[in-house]
Image (spheres, rainbow, N blue to C red):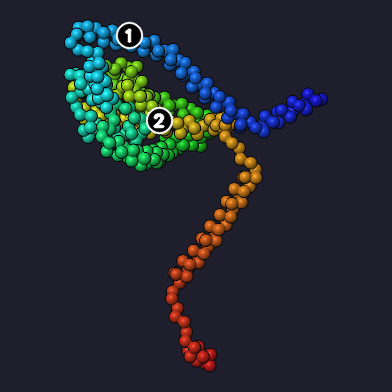
Amino acid sequence: MLQSLAGSSCVRLVERHRSAWCFGFLVLGYLLYLVFGAVVFSSVELPYEDLLRQELRKLKRRFLEEHECLSEPQLEQFLGRVLEASNYGVSVLSNASGNWNWDFTSALFFASTVLSTTGYGHTVPLSDGGKAFCIIYSVIGIPFTLLFLTAVVQRVTIHVTRRPVLYFHIRWGFSKQAVAMVHAFLLGVVTVSCFFFIPAAVFSLLEDDWNFLESFYFCFISLSTIGLGDYVPGEGYNQKFRELYKIGITCYLLLGLIAMLVVLETFCELHELKKFRKMFYVKKDKEEDQVHIIEHDQMSFSSITDQAASVKEDQKQNEPFVPPRSPAFADGAANQ
């Protein structure tokens, strides 16, 4: 008897705080996923980093042996300056791109990466004025971009997701949930094909040093706004039609970002995902809901009274003007 009572009380306790337990497991799962990613990246990339360090040490030692007139501090000073310039997108190599990093098309591409928060990092402002303007430009431009993307995605979602699902549901009588799931899957396949596989094939042809995997990697890193900057198109030596190429990449990034947000919005509207998300949300108490309902009713009543008052004012304004009668005229009419 006591065991059954204790078990039932534990069940009620868990059910009462179910959202808190789910949120705790969510936080724990996220931390474990971070640790898992760190372990995998470290085990995969650390050996390659070690090999690269050993190779650079050998090259440096061999270079100093072949050029005895050059001391190691002088070489390190020169290499430090070269690496510092490379971090700002300026290379001293003879086969580097001869184009400027801050012509109009390159600046347009940089502005698009800043506003979309992609930020490849291959080109950065050199002057203090440029850095200050970048801060002000981003503070205004990033919320502006979010507003722009939200408005565009909301309109595209109506025509691409909601109307087709509603059409098949009403016209053919299919289940709305089943139609939404099939539509989300097909939309995801079309988006991946049009904005990942096809552009990856195009980039692998236009970029001399990129294979298909590297091109697909660039597309994913860019459209997910990660923007690591290890692969940036249009920076090769003697790139043909570089200005037009940069403008095309800017349009591709903007359209691809909109497509990704539309797909995410479509999946978020699925009934199953909505139920799954609610597991981690804080549930409102009934008292709070009643307070919100009362406040809403009060606001609705006040708005109704305001509307009625405004209607009366409009009626008074639209009535023809009748001048008031004088007292003498009123007395004469009464005597008659």
Q: Is residue 110 visible?
A: yes
The amino acid marked with disc number 2 is Met
Lateral position of residue 165 relative to residue 196, left or right: right
Q: Residue 218: x percent and y percent?
A: 34, 22
Q: Residue at x 61, y 31 (%)?
A: 20
For numbered disc 2, what is the local secondary structure?
helix
Q: Residue 279: x percent and y percent?
A: 58, 31
| Neighbour tally class for label 2: few under 14, some 14-19, many 20 plus, Cα within 10 Å | some
**Residue 54 tag number:** 1
Q: Residue at x 67, y 33 (%)?
A: 16
Q: Residue 229: x percent and y percent?
A: 32, 24
Looking at the image, the residue that sits furthest to the right is 1
Mark pair 1, 2: CA separation:
41 Å
Q: Residue 142: x percent and y percent?
A: 37, 38
Mark 1 or mark 2, earlier in chain: 1
For numbered disc 1, what is the local secondary structure?
helix
The amino acid marked with disc number 1 is Gln
Q: Nearer the viewer, residue 70 or 222?
A: 70
Give the number of marks: 2
Q: Residue at x 30, y 39 (%)?
A: 133
Name the residue that disc number 2 marks: 260
